[in-house]
Amino acid sequence: MSDTLVLLEELISCESVTPEDAGCQDLLTKRLEKIGFIAEQLDFDDTKNLWLKRGRNKPLFVFLGHTDVVPTGPLEKWDSPPFVPTIRQHRLYGRGTADMKGGIACFVTAVERFIARYPDHQGAIAMMITSDEEGPATNGVVKVVEVLEQRNEKIDWCLVGEPSSDQHIGDVIRVGRRGSLCARVIVKGMQGHVAYPAIANNPIHGFAPALHALTEEVWDQGNQFFPPTSLQVSNINSGTGAENIIPGELELQFNLRFCTELDEATIKQRVLEIFDRFDFDYEINWRLSGNPFLTSGGALIEAAHAAIKKVTGIDTLDDTGGGTSDGRFIAPTGAEVIELGHLNESIHKINENVPLADLQPLSDIYEQLLVELLIKK
């Protein structure tokens, strides 16, 4: 049994549903302190954050990951208990196998092998691990970055171990992500009897034309790096449950995934312009989950392509699809950021899993990436 598999099984056994860490970071600390890493716990509120670093010189390479996982969903729908690592048909099953304890296990064992081979490598290696990626992400990486910035500890290269691969390990790397802006709208009406609409005000009817205009809006055309900005309504709720009552209020939530053609202020302005074309009373509250970021070139991407090619023989695709990641908090510091990890097919699903055959190649890619960046040619 490989070291990576053993470590991954230990991590899966920790019931670390966000924002819980459930002992994962203690496992990593004990393991990495043995090879010269200095551990610093940077906890905020209910979130555990671990900063592990070996070396003081530049450049600084950081592996970024999270030990928290999403809730399991109905336990009876799993073919095996989600926090009992189980091997079936050459796959390891358990919550967090792909997202992203598998990535953490792979980069830990990669670093162990790399340091055994090159104890006097250039620069420094660090790991930033949080238990608040799958939740609101308010006390995790964003807070750790603030601490590092305050003490002028600058990251040069950051690899996020999120599941990026599509069909084969390393066939896709994320070199950026779209921004995410959420809105909650309260449309105010007047409750009344459905037989007397003249003395009531139905917020559903009042808002319907604006909703149509909002969903039909073409926000931009995208660009060479990003697809066009998109809007999706995620929740809509109104009514008392009775069929003879005009509701007095409607609540709507929507999200925009936006590219670098737009910014937060422009989106807000355009939404309000759409709403104000129609006659209804509303309140709107916004939450920016993250701005778009892009690493359009540089040594990190070049090293990733070279490492993947040497280990797997395939040419990787640079991509900016998918949701958000904690990379959005690292990129504004000036660091080069990419995401490279397991297949993303089963993430957040019942029976989440990774193929056993993918563990060693991914760990080897991480190790070779360090060679490309931190060993003189």
Image: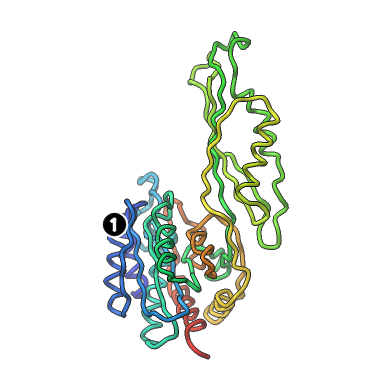
Which quarter of the rendered picture does the N terminus lie within? Answer: bottom left
Mark 1: few/some/many CA within 10 Å (<14, 14-19, 20+): some
Can I make out residue 241 in this image?
A: yes
Of residue 125 and residue 216, the one placed in the foreground of this image is 125
Task: Residue at 31% x, 80% y: name it.
Answer: 35
Quickly name the residue at label 1.
22
Q: Secondary structure at mark 1?
A: loop
Task: Residue at 31% x, 55% y: name it.
Answer: 15
Residue 25's image quarter? Answer: bottom left
Of residue 329 and residue 312, the one placed in the foreground of this image is 329
Looking at the image, residue 20 lies above or below residue 212 = below
Q: Is residue 199 left or right of residue 277?
A: left
Of residue 155 and residue 69, the one placed in the foreground of this image is 155
The mark total stands at 1
**How far across and how far down the image is residue 319, in percent?**
61, 64
Query: Disc 1 marks which amino acid?
Result: Ala
Q: Is residue 231 left or right of residue 374?
A: right
**How far across and how far down the image is residue 163, in percent?**
49, 62
